[in-house]
Image: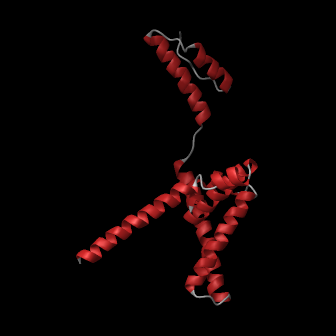
Amino acid sequence: MEPRTEKPGDTKEELIADVVEKADAVTQKEKEARNEAYNAYVRQVTGSYSLVLNVLKAFLTGGLICFTGQIITNVCVHVQGMDAGTAGKWTSLILILASAVLTGLNIYPSLAQFGGAGVLVPITGFANGIASSAMEFKKEGQVFGLGAQIFGIGGPVILYGIFTSWVLGVIYLVIRILA
């Protein structure tokens, strides 16, 4: 068996067929040909990406979300006359609502496709996780679908957040007692 040479016009199906054809490789040369055929398939389906471009897009997307939050806060403080604490609460609520609405309109996944980790700014990413779980399981009914599965993604975050708070509280208590 000759090692696989990749041709620009190879389709996925052709590459898979080549890998399957060489699946029963016995000799070292046949195994190398099989591995080369598999690597050609992986190269085609994986594609390439630019790390610098992905980091830049994530930075810009996350920055835009944070910039939007800052604009909301400034409007609440300077236009509505709220104190900073109240403005922060309204900013959080508006960002959560916007994230949930964009998820419901199927726009947030497109933003995630473009911005990658940039859309994981904690409050909007968490709201997206909860809203997408709700949308995915609503067809299974209110109790066994929506009610049982809505925190499929958010549940671990809540669990470990509460557990970490408890551990830090115990540490704080011990330090206060010993001090």
Give the quarter of the image for residue 5. Answer: top right
**Residue 175 or 92: which is nearer the viewer?**
175
Looking at the image, residue 77 lies above or below residue 19: below
**Residue 11 or 111: which is nearer the viewer?**
111
Looking at the rendered image, the quarter that the C terminus falls into is bottom left
Name the residue located 46 percent from the left edge and 12 percent from the top edge: 29
Residue 163: x and y in percent read 43, 61
User: What count of labels does the image hold?
Assistant: 0
Give the quarter of the image for residue 105. Answer: bottom right
Q: Is residue 166 visible?
A: yes
Residue with the most extreme left position: 178
Q: Can residue 110 be seen in this view?
A: no
| 169 lies left or right of 138 | left
| 60 lies left or right of 28 | right
Residue 140: x and y in percent read 73, 47
Residue 7: x and y in percent read 63, 23
Looking at the image, residue 120 lies above or below residue 73: above
Residue with the most extreme bottom position: 81
**Residue 132 or 81: which is nearer the viewer?**
132
Name the residue located 52 percent from the left edge and 15 percent from the top edge: 3
Name the residue located 58 percent from the left edge and 79 percent from the top edge: 88
Residue 50: x and y in percent read 55, 47
Identify the image's colour scheme: rainbow, by chain, secondary structure or one colour: secondary structure
Give the quarter of the image for residue 44. Answer: top right
Looking at the image, residue 134 lies above or below residue 19: below
Looking at the image, residue 96 lies above or below residue 17: below
Name the residue located 64 percent from the left edge and 52 percent from the top edge: 148
